Amino acid sequence: MVTVMSDHYYSAEPRSRLKLYKLTAYLKGFHLQFITASGVFSPRSIDRGTRVLVENMIIKDGWKVLDLGCGYGVIGIVAAKLAPNGFVILTDINKRAVWLARLNVKVNDVRRNTDVRLGNLYEPVRGEVFDTIITNPPQSAGLKVCYKIIDEAPLLLKEEGILQLVARHSKGGKRLAERMKKVFGNYRVLAKSGGYWVYASIKG
């Protein structure tokens, strides 16, 4: 059983004292800058899982993309750069993360084709459909939360839409891949690096 504490990055209102940081990164061919802070996931550096996912995710220009659990916005901002004629919605339950993501879409000049929304999992996008849902799921929140992301994804994907997620294969990722196969009837591995695997399932 996982006890969710108020200062976890997946809580709505982190109580940790606000400390701001600034990161620069070269991702998928883009030089990017990010304002980060205490109380969000991986504030002092872009974590390896996110890097592996960003470098290997499938994005086509014109797509509508959901960055679920966006944190300070790395995945969604790269997606917006890759799909300038598409549209990316970034969501997070963490108010501080949403504030930072909104700052970062301005810093990286992708305001035109992005929208950052506050809310738990799929709540901010009910009734919408996407070409792809991309997430570095909050494994620390427990399998129940991660399974909910997988189980409900088909309701928000177009036909042949793709769920893409990253996880440490030996620390829960294998079970997530099995769940993806159960729900979608398929999955494939897009990349492996440093113990992190990127999995993708297509809605058929």
Image (cartoon, helix red, strand yellow):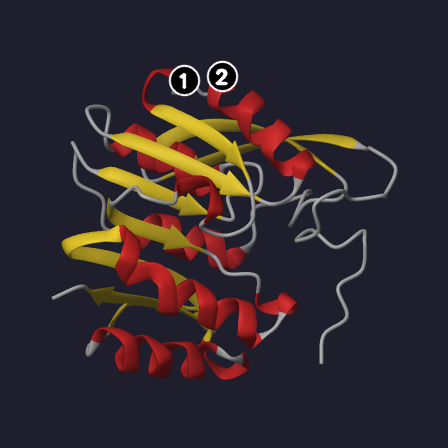
Q: Give the farthest residue toward the right.
A: 17
Q: Is residue 30 left or right of residue 47?
A: left
Mark 2 Cα shell of 10 Å, populated few (<14), some (14-19), many (≥20)? few
Q: Is residue 133 above or below residue 2?
A: above
Where residue 2 sits, quadrant-wise, is bottom right
Q: Is residue 17 left or right of residue 64?
A: right
Q: Residue at x 62, y 29 (%)?
A: 100
Residue 101 or residue 32, whichever sits in front:
101
Q: Residue at x 69, y 43 (%)?
A: 44
Return the mark for residue 106. Answer: 2
Q: Is residue 122 above or below residue 103?
A: below
Quadrant showing the N terminus: bottom right
Q: Is residue 115 left or right of residue 40?
A: left
Q: Residue at x 27, y 61 (%)?
A: 154
C-beta proximity under 8 Å, tags 1 and 2: yes
**Residue pointed to by mark 1:** 111
Q: Residue 11, position in %: x, y?
A: 71, 51
Three-letter code for the amino acid on which mark 1 is drawn: Arg
Return the mark for residue 54. Answer: none
Three-letter code for the amino acid on which mark 2 is drawn: Lys
**One can see residue 197 in this view:** yes
Q: Is residue 148 left or right of residue 40?
A: left
Q: Residue 128, position in %: x, y?
A: 29, 41
Mark 1 Cα shell of 10 Å, populated few (<14), some (14-19), many (≥20)? some
Residue 7 or residue 19, whichever sits in front:
7
Mark 1 vs mark 2, CA separation in Å: 6 Å
**One can see residue 57 in this view:** no
Considering the numbered disc 1 on the image, is that residue within a helix, a strand or a loop? helix
Q: Residue 94, position in %: x, y?
A: 65, 43
Q: Residue at x 31, y 28 (%)?
A: 81
Q: Residue 174, position in %: x, y?
A: 42, 83
Residue 162 or residue 46, whichever sits in front:
162
